[in-house]
Image (cartoon, rainbow, N blue to C red):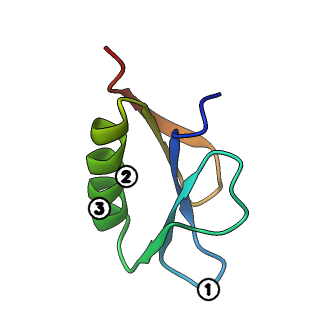
Amino acid sequence: MAKNTRHVVPSSSGGWSVRKAGASKASKNFDTQADAVSYGKEHAKKDRSDVFIHSKSGRIRDHTSYKP
């Protein structure tokens, strides 16, 4: 998996986080999943990478690729 891949995941402190693949800390935290998805997709587009959106249980529920 590419290092620039983004994951939208539930935050342990509530809300949602966006993390790069392999990162131990979140790039940014959000109150809503919609805001986190928007941020994740924006950065995945810039990096020409993927974004994986996880459900509250942690399972992947959606995936979008911006690779050429």
Secondary element type, mark 3? helix
Among numbered discs 3 and 2, the one appearing first in the sequence: 3
Q: Which residue is disc 2 drawn over?
A: 40
Query: What residue is shown with label 3?
Result: 34
Nearer the camera: disc 3 or disc 2: 2
Residue, x 55% and y 82% (percent of image)? Answer: 14
6 sits left or right of 42 in the view: right
Q: How many marks?
A: 3
Percent coordinates x, y for residue 21 in the rendering: 63, 45
Whole-angstrom CA distance, mark 3 to mark 2, is 10 Å
Above or below for 22 versus 32: above
Q: Which mark is residue 55?
A: none
Give whichever of discs 3 and 1 has the lower sequence position. Answer: 1
Q: Residues within 10 Å of mark 2 (few under 14, many from 20)?
A: many
Q: Quadrant of residue 65?
A: top left
Q: Residue at x 48, y 78 (%)?
A: 15
Kindly indicate whether the residue at mark 2 contacts the one at mark 3 (C-beta within 8 angstroms): no
Q: Amino acid at mark 1?
A: Ser
Work out which quarter of the rendered image holds the N terminus and state it. top right
Say which quadrant the C terminus sits in: top left
Mark seen at residue 13: 1
Amino acid at the residue labelled 2: Gly
User: Does the residue at mark 1 contact the one at mark 2 (Cβ under 8 Å)?
Assistant: no
Question: Is label 1 in a helix, a strand or a loop?
Answer: loop
- Three-letter amino acid code at the position of disc 3: Ala
